[in-house]
Image (cartoon, rainbow, N blue to C red):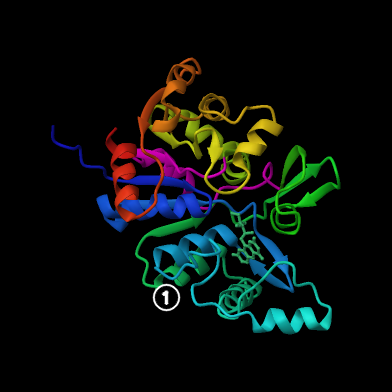
Amino acid sequence: MALKSVRMITVLCGGVGAAKMLTGLRMVAPDHELLGIVNTGDDLWMHGLRICPDLDTITYTLAGLNNTETGWGLAGESWRVMGELDALGGDAWFSLGDRDLALHLYRTQRLNNGDSLSSITADVLAHFGVGLRLLPVSEDPIATRFSTREHGWMSFQEYFVKFHHDVVVDALAFDGALEARPTAGVLDAIRDAERIVISPSNPLISIGPMVAIDALRSALIARRDDVVVVSPLVGNKALKGPADRLLDELGFSASASGVARFYREIAGTLVIDEHDAHDAPSVAAESMRCVVAPTIMADPATSEALAKVVLHG
Ligand code: FO1
């Protein structure tokens, strides 16, 4: 059977899972057919600098410069500035590498000059030789916060880095999401795409802040039949990060059916891993089409195979 050619593919992106998904998609579609809409709920101000972890993780990965040991930041990094800051007694719990600092300095200066995050992102991608387009989901600030049993409310990076996501979460907030307007081009990219892919990112905290924007959620609902989600779970466990734990803590259950319950309103198809094949009927029970495939993107070849599944499976 001949594969149908895809004109435009829009991908909703968190960090590492999205970077791997995009790596695969770039092997089966040219960059000009791909557009990533990127979560900004993890973004923060630190030392007066604007830091956008998901945008940066994807950019560094697509440029082949990512740090595969940490999963964030640049390869071959050094930490001299942080070492000095720590020695001074400064706030060094959130580590900014010496090389990585340049991007935060550059972005912050341009934001202070009035440039948009989208235009800065486009210039950074061009600088690193990445032809694919990425749009921050909104130019307006969105901040994910966690209500924890042990310490009350905290910011995204306090939860993730300071407390190593080892605290019990009983609620989430996406500050600013209700008022946030999608970045110019985002709604068109959802309306006009032949297929919309939701990458295997954390549903609650990577995709959640984006679909909390009313206009974006409505745009996805209107395209539900063409929205394909890849579950971030393998054998009911997250490969990285707290997706499984949060699905349980926030009442969805860490399982393919829990992921389906989160997405059923906005997506028509859920791709689940072979290890979870027995859960396919419970996905269908949530009125989603279920595709079973290997979802672990261990290398570019497995990313490419998964990309073919999300486009044509
Ligand atoms: N993750 C950590 O576990 N520790 C850090 O010190 C840290 C610093 C950091 C700096 C820049 C950046 O872009 C990402 C950074 N991350 C760090 C990763 C980040 O906390 C999370 O992985 C994402 O926000 C979740 O997708």
Image height of 148 relative to 81, above or below: above
User: In the depicted view, which residue is nearer to us: 18 or 135?
Assistant: 18
Q: Residue at x 83, y 47 (%)?
A: 153
Q: Is residue 163 visible?
A: yes
* Quadrant of the image containing the C terminus: top left
**55 sits to left or right of 47:** left
Q: Could you tell me which secondary element the residue under label 1 belongs to?
A: helix
Start and end of the magenta stretch? 176-202
Q: Is residue 288 visible?
A: no
* Quadrant of the image containing the N terminus: top left
Q: Residue 119: x, y in percent?
A: 50, 66
User: In the rendered picture of this protein, how many numbered marks are placed on residues?
Assistant: 1
Q: Residue at x 66, y 31 (%)?
A: 248
The amino acid sitting under disc 1 is: His
Image height of 235 relative to 41, above or below: above
**Outermost residue toward the right?**
151
Q: Residue at x 62, y 27 (%)?
A: 253
Image height of 153 relative to 56, above or below: above
Residue hosting label 1:
127
User: In the depicted view, which residue is nearer to us: 115 or 124?
Assistant: 124
Question: Is the CB atom of the residue marked by disc 1 within 8 angstroms of ligand 1's nearest atom?
Answer: no
Q: Residue 204: x, y in percent?
A: 62, 39
